[in-house]
Amino acid sequence: MSRHVGTLNVFFDGQFWTGVFENTNDGKLSVCKVIFGAEPKDCEIYEFILKNYHKLKFSPEIEISEKMTAKNPKRIQREAKKQLQTVGIGTKSQQALKLQHEQMKTERRIISRERNEAEKRRIYEMKQSKRKEKHKGH
C-alpha cells in the first residue's frame, strides 16, 4: 500500500520567514525550501500552496526509515508541542536540501563551463578570420 505524507514547516530563520515542504512517499523523503519574506498568514500559506505547489522543485528522494508503532496519545501531544517549539529543519530535510544544492551547483558548473568554452571558441575563430583577412591583401 502506497503511503504519501506531505508536511510544511514555517519558521523564522533570523532574517526571513521560511517554509520547508517535506514529501514522504513510500519511505523516501524529498524536500523543497521556500522563502516567504514577511510573516505569512494561514490564508496566504494556503493560497501559496494552491497556486504554486505544482511549480516547486523538490530535491532528489533519499531513503528514510519509518517505524510503524502505536503511540500513546499524550506522547503524540508532547511531540507535536516539541515540533512547534523547535526552530530549523530536520536532519533528513537538511540532507535532502544539501543534495539538491549540490546537484544545482554541478549543473551550474557544467553550464558555465560550456558557456566559457563557447566564448573561447568564438574568440579563437574571430582571431583566425582576422589573420586570414590580413593575408588576403597580397
Image (cartoon, rainbow, N blue to C red):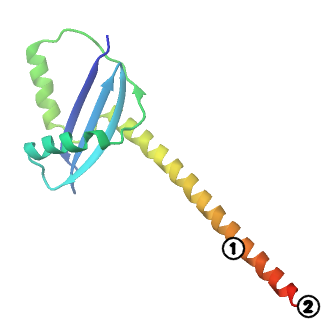
What amino acid type is highlighted by mark number 2? His
The residue that appears at 12% across and 18% down in the rendered structure is: 75
Q: Earlier in the sequence, mark 2 or mark 1?
A: 1
Element at label 2: loop
Image height check: is 109 above or below 11? Answer: below
The residue that appears at 13% across and 19% down in the rendered structure is: 76
Q: Quadrant of residue 48?
A: top left
Near mark 1 (Cα within 10 A), the count class, few <14, some 14-19 or many ≥20, is few
**Residue sitting at the far bottom:** 138
Near mark 2 (Cα within 10 A), the count class, few <14, some 14-19 or many ≥20, is few
- Residue 68 is marked as none
**Residue sitting at the far right:** 138
Read off the residue under disc 2.
138
> At which x and y percent is residue 41?
8, 47
What amino acid type is highlighted by mark number 1? Ile
Read off the residue under disc 1.
123
The residue that appears at 77% across and 77% down in the rendered structure is: 129
